[in-house]
């Protein structure tokens, strides 16, 4: 069979996905934007989000340009022939790699930007729709989330298929992936710092010091807080999943490219086939996400995910029967998607207030914040277990299934990662719905809409939190499998350059690399969280200053200066990214060029293991503390204002940068480091000090 | 501009002001540039009420707008033994202001709450501020500490609120505290158990308890009176507040 047709199918599928996203975008715009007051509030949020994204993308464009030039220069020389014919100049390759890198970064930015654009339009319309019914508000917010989900997978599939069709070189797609991941890392980390800076500052001064309720328009940081939901949870998360999605496919493409030449093309294209099928499955699955008046939005979201999985597996089964894909591919992808869903739902066990971990953490809060922290942290550590077991089972099963069907085991692991992420269209749609309804609730509050609207928004918001928790478990586990495949891809690239990796713990260089790698995710997390506390401190001072200099703000006779807080959050987030960016991109190169490919292999191994552990711990512990606080607020253990509530608030504040800043950035960190290693492996194989 | 007399309960004071009750509540709770802040509770006093104990007319003369035309926010008439010198009939509406300045007005009722079974928890607000548990219902409790000539502990006038006890009202030992935010719950249980099983009808839980009440814990409402008269200001049900005074309800439930 001519597998090139699948590239065209992929491009067509991506185009359909984008077309549906554009259609939904304009459908959202046609909905009632609500009262003048609601539009004014939404305008503040839109303006703040645009200001931040403009600054972020201006900074990232400069960075992408500089990195693009460096990539163009480096890949214009073929160092592989240095020992025989000397260094060959190949300017075409340099230009192609740089172009792919920039297209990848651009696609990632466009995906995040589209999501953010629709989110800031959908939030006010969702609040307005909630005045009429829960059903309408849910439909609107979910379709708005689907704009991001479908645009993201569409751009990714088109980008990968088109680049491979034109270049026939999986390494060029690696450049595309590196561009997407670099931008994603900075968008996610920057968005995470922004959103938690605003959130923590708004809460500590507004709620704790002055007793102002959440989303009260008198709080000068309230707009920055709502902007943060968009730039962190929509734009940042969109770029983040885009990066994992592409990276998983690229890792398998590189592994496929190492097959014997007769099989090479087929096995390089197969991950693109899986992504295309996932795109169509998501398009169909989205139609099943509906809720009746009085129904449960969370159940509707879960139903959509399950149905999408079933459609996906059924489609793969047909492809398997028609011999388009092997049985080994079918089983590996199925193992991946089933494991992903199971991991997602087990994550929910640790963050849902219907189960023991959240209830127990809330209960012990009656004894003070120290016990809250210890209990939540401990459950966070336990929560690693099911996800890691899931990854272990998926790894071993997919490896053995692939081997028993005549494929390299590591290829099967990569296919499992692609399987997990191939329904990202649906997963991201459900996830992006969360910040939209969160914003809608804020607008309803700030615009003075009725309590029935706010209560409907609360119901929608609660489902969004659950979807968010499931997505995090899903994406971190997928990243774990992805980086395992990327690690194998790195080995293949190094091997292709004449070096057999020896990742033995008896080698001092490897041990050094493992330790340095293991150190990096905690260090990266610390830098991000310190940025949050540093910036939140500045913003707290600004909020206090405004209340001090303008006493009419609290009395309701003067308006706060929202722009000052928005500007502070944006400046703080962007100025905090330099060192984390160096850790992600620069450190693997330093290790590789100084200590050599084996040490770099050890470095990746160390980083992968602590990265996955820390990502799971932080995401789950943060979610658990958040929901323990909400559980107390429902009237348990003394309810709001009690000692238990005060302790739970401390836990929630500690967990905020865990779950929304450091945790979700770590999977991108390890992906970026693995991509850097694979991309520069041919050069590191030639130039290394030790 | 119209002037108002307010009997503040936190702290006890008689104040004349050119602000309406809602404006005064916001001013009193969130402060001005002087930064005095916190929950406020106050009665509006009949503007025609006079008592030689207070120099009310003199205070009225001083209560004039600022030079820039802003209304005068407060002139303190008296800060000592105020409640006992005001006739309960002169008290108009009671206003409860949240920490962030939202004000709810309560009207007096001619009907007192039904004498339900179980134990009671009272927060005295003025002139003293202990937290007390009792077997007595609110009216009997009032009679005990204001009207009973044989009681060693009595006050000439009082304002207090009955607070919720939930399941502890009938089962102090094993009842669930649920959403009641009281500190030191074990001591509260012990005190309730004592009044349930021992001879004493009332027992002090906390002798210096802060009179700042989480409004959501108020069971029936506020009681104010002296030896001649007791008045009752019922608190609307939470569901009513949620629908009719959502902003206040939300702030009060922090």
Image (spheres, coloured by chain):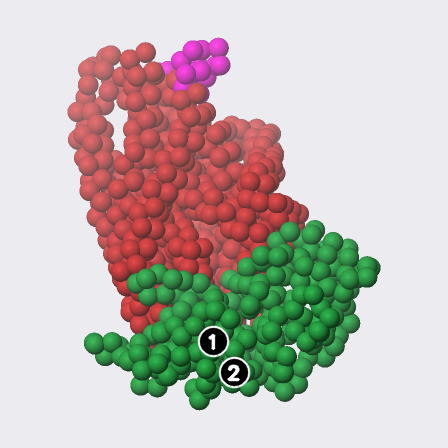
Are both tags, 1 and 2, on one chain?
yes
Front in this rendered view, residue B54 or B18: B54
Shown colour of chain A: red
Q: Which chain is green?
A: B
Q: Considering the numbered disc 2 on the image, is that residue within a helix, a strand or a loop?
A: strand
Residue at 51% from the left image edge and 55% from the top image edge: A465
Q: Position of residue B84 (x, y in %)?
A: 55, 75
* Left or right of residue A283, residue A122 in this image: left
Question: Who is closer to the viewer here, A527 or A632?
Answer: A632
Contact, mark 1 vs mark 2 (Cβ under 8 Å):
yes
Work out whether residue A663 or residue B26 is closer to the camera in this orientation and state it.
B26
Residue A482 drawn in magenta: no
Among the 4 quarters of the image, the one containing residue A445: bottom left
Instruction: Quote the CA–CA distance across marks 1 and 2.
Output: 8 Å
Instruction: Give me the chain letter of mark 2.
Output: B
As drawn, the label of residue B7 is 1
Question: Badge 2 is on which residue?
Answer: B91
Give the magenta-colored segment's residue range.
A496-514
In this image, A219 relative to B105: left or right?
A: left
Does residue A644 appear to the left or right of A153 in the view shown? right
Q: Quadrant of the N terminus of chain A?
A: top left
Q: Does residue B227 appear anywhere in the picture? A: yes
The residue located at (58%, 58%) in the rendering is B209
The answer to if A507 sits in the magenta stretch is yes
């Amino acid at each position: 069979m001519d597998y090139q047709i699948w590239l065209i199918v992929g491009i067509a599928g991506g185009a359909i996905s984008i077309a549906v996203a554009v259609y939904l975008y304009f459908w959202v715009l046609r909905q009632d934007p609500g009262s003048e007051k609601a539009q004014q509030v939404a305008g503040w949020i839109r303006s703040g989000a645009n200001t931040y994204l403009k600054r972020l993308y201006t900074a990232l464009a400069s960075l992408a340009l500089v990195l693009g030039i460096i990539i163009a220069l480096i890949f214009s020389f073929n160092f592989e022939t240095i020992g025989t014919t000397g260094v060959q100049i190949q300017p075409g390759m340099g230009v192609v790699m740089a172009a792919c890198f920039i297209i990848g970064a651009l696609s990632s930015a466009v995906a995040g930007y589209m999501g953010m654009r629709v989110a800031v339009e959908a939030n006010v319309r969702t609040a307005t729709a909630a005045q009429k019914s829960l059903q309408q508000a849910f439909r609107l917010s979910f379709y708005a989330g689907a704009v991001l989900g479908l645009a993201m997978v569409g751009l990714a599939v088109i980008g990968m298929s088109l680049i491979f069709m034109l270049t026939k070189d999986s390494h060029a797609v690696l450049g595309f992936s590196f561009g997407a991941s670099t931008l994603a890392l900075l968008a996610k980390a920057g968005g995470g710092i922004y959103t938690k800076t605003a959130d923590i500052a708004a809460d500590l001064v507004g709620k704790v010091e002055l007793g102002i309720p959440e989303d009260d328009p008198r709080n000068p940081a309230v707009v920055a807080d709502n902007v943060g939901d968009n730039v962190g949870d929509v734009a940042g998360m969109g770029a983040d999943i885009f990066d994992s999605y592409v990276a998983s496919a690229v890792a398998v493409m590189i592994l496929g490219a190492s097959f014997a030449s007769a099989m090479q093309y087929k096995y390089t294209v197969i991950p693109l086939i899986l992504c295309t099928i996932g795109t169509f499955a998501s398009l169909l699955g989205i139609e099943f996400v509906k809720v009746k008046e009085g129904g449960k939005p969370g159940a509707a979201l879960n139903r959509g995910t399950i149905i999408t999985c079933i459609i996906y597996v059924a489609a793969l089964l047909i492809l398997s029967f028609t011999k388009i894909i092997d049985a080994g591919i079918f089983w590996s992808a199925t193992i991946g998607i089933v494991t992903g869903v199971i991991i997602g739902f087990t994550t929910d066990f640790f963050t849902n207030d219907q189960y023991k971990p959240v209830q127990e953490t809330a209960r012990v809060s009656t004894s003070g914040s120290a016990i809250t922290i210890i209990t939540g942290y401990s459950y966070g550590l336990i929560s690693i277990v099911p996800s890691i077991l899931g990854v272990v089972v998926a790894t071993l099963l997919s490896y053995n299934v692939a081997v028993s069907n005549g494929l390299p085991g590591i290829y099967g692991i990569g296919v499992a990662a692609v399987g997990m992420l191939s329904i990202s269209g649906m997963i991201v749609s459900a996830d992006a719905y969360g910040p939209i309804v969160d914003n809608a609730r804020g607008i309803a509050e700030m615009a003075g809409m009725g309590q029935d609207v706010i209560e409907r928004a609360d119901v929608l918001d609660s489902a969004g939190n659950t979807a968010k928790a499931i997505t995090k478990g899903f994406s971190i586990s997928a990243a774990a499998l992805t980086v395992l495949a990327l690690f194998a891809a790195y080995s293949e690239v190094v091997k292709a350059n004449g070096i057999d990796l020896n990742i033995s713990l008896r080698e001092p260089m490897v041990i050094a690399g493992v330790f340095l790698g293991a150190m990096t995710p905690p260090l990266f997390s610390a830098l991000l969280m310190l940025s949050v506390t540093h910036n939140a401190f500045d913003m707290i001072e600004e909020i206090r200053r405004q209340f001090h200099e303008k006493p009419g703000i609290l009395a309701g006779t003067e308006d706060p200066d929202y722009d000052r807080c928005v500007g502070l959050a944006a400046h703080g987030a962007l100025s905090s990214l330099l060192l984390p960016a160096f850790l992600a991109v620069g450190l693997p190169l330093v290790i590789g060029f100084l200590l050599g490919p084996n040490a770099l292999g050890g470095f990746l191994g160390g980083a992968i293991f602590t990265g996955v552990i820390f990502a799971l711990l932080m995401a789950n512990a943060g979610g658990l503390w958040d929901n323990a606080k909400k559980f107390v607020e429902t009237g348990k253990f003394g309810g709001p204002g009690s000692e238990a509530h005060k302790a739970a608030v401390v836990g929630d504040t500690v967990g905020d940068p865990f779950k929304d800043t450091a945790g979700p950035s770590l999977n991108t960190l390890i992906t970026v480091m693995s991509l850097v290693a694979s991309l520069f492996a041919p050069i590191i194989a030639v130039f290394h000090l030790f | 501009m119209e002037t108002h007399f307010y009997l503040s309960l936190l702290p006890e004071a008689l104040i004349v002001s050119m602000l309406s009750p809602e404006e005064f509540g916001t001013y009193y709770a969130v402060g001005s540039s002087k930064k005095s802040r916190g929950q406020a509770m106050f009665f509006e006093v009949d503007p025609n009420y006079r008592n030689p104990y207070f120099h009310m007319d003199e205070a009225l003369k001083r209560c004039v707008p600022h030079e820039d035309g802003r209304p005068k926010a407060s002139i303190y008439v008296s800060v000592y033994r105020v409640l006992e010198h005001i006739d309960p009939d002169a008290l108009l509406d009671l206003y409860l202001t949240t920490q962030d300045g939202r004000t709810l007005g309560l009207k007096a009722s001619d009907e007192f709450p039904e004498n339900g079974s179980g134990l009671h928890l009272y927060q005295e607000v003025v002139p003293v501020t202990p937290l007390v548990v009792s077997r007595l219902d609110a009216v009997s409790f009032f009679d005990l500490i204001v009207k009973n000539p044989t009681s060693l502990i009595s006050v000439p006038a009082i304002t207090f609120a009955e607070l919720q006890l939930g399941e502890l009202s009938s089962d102090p030992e094993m009842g669930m505290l649920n959403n009641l935010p009281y500190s030191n719950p074990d001591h509260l249980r012990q005190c309730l158990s004592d009044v349930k099983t021992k001879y004493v009808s009332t027992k002090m839980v906390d002798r210096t308890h802060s009179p700042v009440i989480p409004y959501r814990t108020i069971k029936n409402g506020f009681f104010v009176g002296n030896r001649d008269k007791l008045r009752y200001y019922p608190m609307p049900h939470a569901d009513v507040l949620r629908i009719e005074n959502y902003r206040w309800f939300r702030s009060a439930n922090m």
